[in-house]
Image (cartoon, helix red, strand yellow):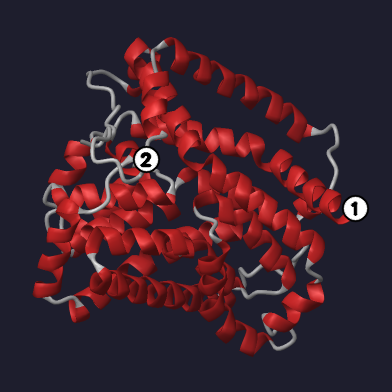
Amino acid sequence: MEAVGRALALAGSMTWEILWALILGFALSAVVQALVRRATVVRLLGDDRPRTLAIATGLGIASSSCSYAAVALARSLLRKGANFTAAMAFEIASTNLVIELGVILALLMGWQFTLAEFVGGPIMIVALAVFFRIFLRKQLLEKALEQADRGLTGSMEGHAAMDMSVQMQGSLWRRLRSAPGLTAVSHIFVMEWAAVWKDIVGGLLIAGAIGAWVPDSFWRAFFLANDPVLAGIWGPIVGPLVAVISFVCSIGNVPLAVVLWNGGISFGGVVAFIFADLIILPILNIYRKYYGLKMAALMVGAFYLAMVIAGYAIELIFGGLGLVPSNRGAMVMESGISWNYTTWLNIAFLILAALLVLRFFRSGGLPMLRMMGGSPDSEHSHAQ
């Protein structure tokens, strides 16, 4: 019981440290999503030219999603005519290059990790595009698209397919102050939380347990921390593999990244680990159902290699510029809550969250929330 209590205390401390930043990130994401039409996204993603991939990346950032919703949305874009590589670039950006992830990384691990995420993401997308250009055959793609038209549907795709953007003219401030604007922001805010809260809670509990129960000596040995050269080579290779078996996706893997960083994983390794939320075991099974076994295998290989390449690139670039942090002591790894600026920020943003949730329920959002909770295999979902 003492060990369980210690793990829960660490998880609770992490939660308290990042709560205000989570609310801020999801609120900003909701504002952005309320102003971008999904129809515009589809119209701009018809090929895999560099300009199109850049647009896909930018629009993916604007359409921030949890990992499951990002995967479902990419399939929706494909079914509406988007290029496969562009859809995958959109998928990567919408879960790994988003506001809330950058805020949490800066708060828990330092601004260097936020910068590394936004530098490494485009590198990963370029590597993925090159890999698909070389290895993706037309026949395999055609079969995958046929499977995409009849594959898994349900609550995840229902969440991804909802277009709640504000359809009105005027300045950003005017649209935000309008009744439709506030309603759209509140709906997206609540739906995003509903989609990822289990992953966030799971990530915090796993990180608390590992931080409390696994000694640093194990991680230092596992990540070869005593040999900086070998650690730099080993980290990007093993980082995504740890993510695959952790089952934690989206922002939920950041607390575990803190534990791994404190344990001695290389800078590039922890960045590759964070990127790997798109190849965790449940999502691998979704790829199989969406696109067939052969395409899923190709996707997993391409994603993994792109993550490793991005990790190596970050290790070399940031190491060469002297931007790799030397401090491995994360503030959230000390259990306990004190009355400081974090407390005041949490109070302020909890009030904001309460107002948005109240707006959500008063504007009739409950039926939509119930539809998100439907069976993933339902053929008559909100996505239809």
Residue labelled with disc 1? 2
Q: Compared with residue 332, is residue 169 higher up or lower down, i.e. above or below?
A: above
Disc 2 on helix, strand or loop? Answer: loop
Q: Is residue 94 above or below residue 326?
A: above
Image point (28%, 23%), residue name: 166
| Closest to the observer, 260 or 24 | 260
Name the residue located 69 percent from the left edge and 57 percent from the top edge: 207
Spatial distance from mark 1 to mark 2, Cα to Cα? 38 Å
The vertical placement of 203 against 175, above or below, is: below
Q: Give the mark, 1 or 2, whose residue is nearer the N terminus.
A: 1
Residue 274 position, x and y percent, is 53, 62
Q: Position of residue 254 (x, y in %)?
A: 60, 55
Q: Is residue 240 shown to the viewer in this render?
A: yes
Three-letter code, disc 2 = Ser
How crowded is the residue under tag 1: few (<14 C-alpha within 10 Å), some, or many (20+)? few
Residue visible at 9% across and 74% down in the picture: 139
Quadrant where the C terminus sits is top left
Visible residue check, residue 173: no
> In percent of the image, x 78 and y 47: which residue is there?
8
Mark 1 in CB contact with mark 2 (< 8 angstroms): no
Residue at numbered disc 2: 375
Q: For the residue labelled by badge 1, is the local secondary structure a helix, a strand or a loop?
A: helix
Viewer-side residue, 344 vs 221: 221
Q: Position of residue 12 (x, y in %)?
A: 76, 43
Residue 345 falls in image quadrant: top right
Kind of residue at disc 1 = Glu
- In which quadrant of the rendered view does residue 350 lie? top right
